[in-house]
Structures are given as structure tokens and as C-alpha cells.
Image: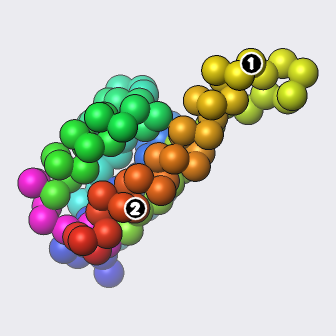
Amino acid sequence: MFTNKVAVVTGGAKGIGRAIAQEFRKAGAAVCVIDLLPNEYFVGDVSDKAVLEEFARKVITEHGHVDCLINNALPLMKGIDACSWEEFNYALRVGVTAPFYLTKLFAPHF
């Protein structure tokens, strides 16, 4: 069903992201995971622009295209009383900026 398809999964080293990656693999897709945690493809912080660019280059160099982009990386989850300015901005980079920028980087290759 997903033979010759490429799925990118952020936050794919554990939990829901890992389950998503496994299901894509079972269906025949090549899966490219980016996560802070060790995984079989790419370890990196999606809040970092240079890391996203390096990751996207690797995916396109190795596969030439992307069919699915699953933005699963979890931003920091803290309430307003416990979250600092820096933590809030990190959460925005993970939960908003990274999905935007990965979509932009991969758009010519979908």
C-alpha cells in the first residue's frame, strides 16, 4: 500500500510517533524519523532551524521525495504559571515553527 512512499515523522522515537512510524513501515513505506531521542534515522532538535535543514537535505538526498509529513513532536507542555519565556518560545518552535518550516522545505518534493 505504501511501497515506494516516504513518510517523515517528527517525534517518532517513542510513544504515538513510534507507533505511527511502525505502521508506515509495516505498510511498506520508507520512514524518516527525527527525534531528540536515539532512533534509527536522525537525532536532532526540531526547534533548531539548521537541524531541520540538515534533516531535510538527508531525506531528499536519500529518497528524492516525501509523500507524508507527520508533525508529531510534542512541544513543552506547562501551564502559564510554570512556563518561562524561554520555555514558551521553545514550545512555539517545536509545535508551530518546525511544522511550518518542514512543510516549506519539503513542499517542492511532495
Provide the residue designation for mark 2. Answer: 103
Label 2 is placed on what type of residue? Thr
Q: Position of residue 49 (x, y in %)?
A: 36, 37
Question: From this viewpoint, which residue is outermost toward the right?
Answer: 81
Label 2 crowding class (10 Å Cα cut-off): few <14, some 14-19, many 20+? some
Q: How is the image coloured?
A: rainbow
Q: Position of residue 101 (x, y in %)?
A: 41, 53
Q: Position of residue 96 (x, y in %)?
A: 58, 49
Label 1 is placed on what type of residue? Ser
* Corner quadrant of residue 74: top right
Q: Give the magenta range.
A: 61-67
Question: Image point 16% across, 46% down: which residue?
Answer: 58
Report the side of 72 relative to 35 (left or right): right
- Nearest the eye: 73 or 29: 73
Reply above or below: 56 against 37.
below
- Nearest the eye: 99 or 6: 99
Reply above or below: 106 against 85.
below
Provide the residue designation for mark 1. Answer: 84
- Mark sitting earlier along the chain (1/2): 1
Question: From this viewpoint, which residue is outermost toward the front?
Answer: 85
Q: Residue 64 lies in magenta, yes or no? A: yes
Is any part of residue 43 visible from this angle?
A: yes
Reply above or below: 58 against 31.
above
* Corner quadrant of residue 36: top left
